[in-house]
């Protein structure tokens, strides 16, 4: 299927990533349906979308016409069939659990048009592990956005050995048309490119803290002032979620069997305490209620 056949997009998962991915697609002019198995999540996604668009207008970053157009392009669907029944391209952004994703892709395969490409936003679960849950493995691949998706430019596109070149080319071009810069990952590998680089930095920072060489704040200061990083690894973990870091590393270890891929003990400690970062008000740093 060529890019010109992609007229309608569906996003499955109305959490932070799914909501933002849908917004990016809608702003680019694509009719986009958002669905979540939890109805309350769909309501929250709609409330966030309206608030975010209003804020962009207030700051002069979007016009009222652009906001109105984006809202016209967005559908917050409580029905799975309604969301995906006419979709030409589906982006899944649900929980990082392989069994749940396999079930989701099986449902998508039955509900979507035969030509639709099915992409997972996962950065830890390879598409080869879910493609055989469908009858269209050639149209299944990873399309990994970065958080926050409304800001970050990169999209990593990675197929599995059975993904067609047409599916990859269409996904690369769709990324460009929604304003992103795609990079192709040419061989399946957990965590892809950017996150493997990020994990290397974060893991070294965790080792430095564990050995008492530096505090998280000092590691972040060295990264931002010495390496010109926009954000240090500990502040970034707080932003994206220490729970996310825990689950991603757990899945990576499950796939590789390499003990080095296990979540670092300091991450495990934070996870077990429920200190997930900015979303809970405490992680490596503490956050006032208005910053949660």
Image (cartoon, rainbow, N blue to C red):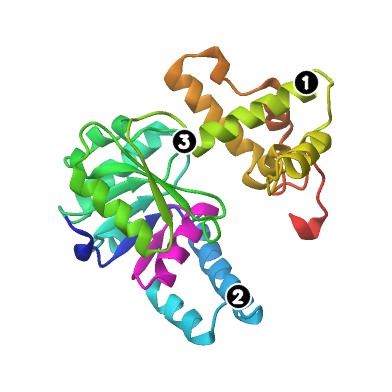
Q: Earlier in the sequence, mark 1 or mark 3?
A: 3
Residue 206 shown left or right of residue 252 in the figure: right
Contact (Cβ within 8 Å) of mark 1 with mark 3: no
Residue 34 is situated, as x and y percent measured from the top left of the image, at 41, 62
Please tell me how crowded label 3 is: few (under 14), some (14-19), or many (20+) other residues with Cα within 10 Å. some
Residue to which mark 3 is pinned = 193
* Residue 109: image tag: none
The secondary element bearing badge 2 is classed as: helix
* Image quarter hosting the N terminus: bottom left
Residue 224 is situated, as x and y percent measured from the top left of the image, at 74, 44
Looking at the picture, tell me which residue is in the foreground, 169 or 73.
169
The secondary element bearing badge 1 is classed as: helix
The secondary element bearing badge 3 is classed as: loop
Residue appearing at x 48%, y 27% in the figure: 251
* Separation (CA) of disc 2 from disc 1: 41 Å
* Residue 56: image tag: 2
* Residue 210: image tag: 1
Task: Indicate whether residue 265 is drawn in magenta.
Answer: no
Please tell me how crowded label 2 is: few (under 14), some (14-19), or many (20+) other residues with Cα within 10 Å. some
* Separation (CA) of disc 1 from disc 3: 26 Å
Residue appearing at x 82%, y 45% in the figure: 286
Q: Earlier in the sequence, mark 3 or mark 2?
A: 2
Please tell me how crowded label 1 is: few (under 14), some (14-19), or many (20+) other residues with Cα within 10 Å. some
Looking at the rendered image, the disc whose residue lies closer to the viewer, 1 or 3, is: 3
Q: Earlier in the sequence, mark 2 or mark 1?
A: 2
The stretch in magenta equals 15-39
* Image quarter hosting the C terminus: bottom right
- Picture quadrant where residue 241 is located: top right
């Amino acid at each position: 299927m060529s890019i010109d056949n992609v007229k309608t997009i569906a996003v499955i998962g109305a959490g932070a990533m799914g909501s933002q991915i849908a917004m990016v697609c809608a702003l680019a002019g694509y009719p986009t349906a958002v669905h979540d198995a939890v109805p309350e999540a769909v309501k929250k996604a709609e409330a966030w979308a309206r608030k975010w668009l209003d804020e962009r207008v207030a700051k002069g970053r979007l016009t009222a016409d652009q906001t109105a157009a984006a809202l016209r392009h967005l559908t917050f669907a409580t029905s799975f069939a309604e969301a995906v029944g006419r979709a030409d391209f589906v982006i899944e952004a649900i929980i990082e659990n392989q069994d749940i994703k396999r079930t989701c892709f099986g449902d998508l395969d039955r509900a979507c048009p035969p030509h639709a490409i099915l992409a997972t936003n996962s950065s830890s679960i390879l598409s080869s592990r879910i493609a055989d849950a469908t009858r269209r493995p050639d149209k299944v691949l990873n399309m990994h956005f970065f958080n926050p998706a409304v800001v970050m430019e990169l999209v990593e596109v990675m197929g599995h050995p059975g993904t067609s070149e047409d599916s990859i080319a269409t996904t690369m071009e769709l990324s460009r048309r929604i304003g992103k810069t795609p990079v192709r990952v040419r061989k399946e590998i957990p965590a892809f490119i950017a996150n493997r680089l990020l994990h290397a930095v974060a893991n070294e920072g965790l080792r430095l803290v564990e050995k008492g060489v530096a505090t998280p704040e000092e590691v972040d200061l060295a990264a931002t002032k010495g390496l010109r990083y926009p954000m240090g690894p500990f502040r970034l973990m707080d932003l994206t979620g220490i729970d996310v870091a825990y689950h991603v590393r757990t899945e990576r270890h499950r796939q590789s069997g390499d003990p080095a891929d296990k979540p670092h003990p300091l991450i495990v400690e934070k996870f077990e305490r429920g200190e997930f970062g900015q979303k809970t008000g405490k992680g490596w740093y503490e956050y006032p209620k208005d910053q949660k």
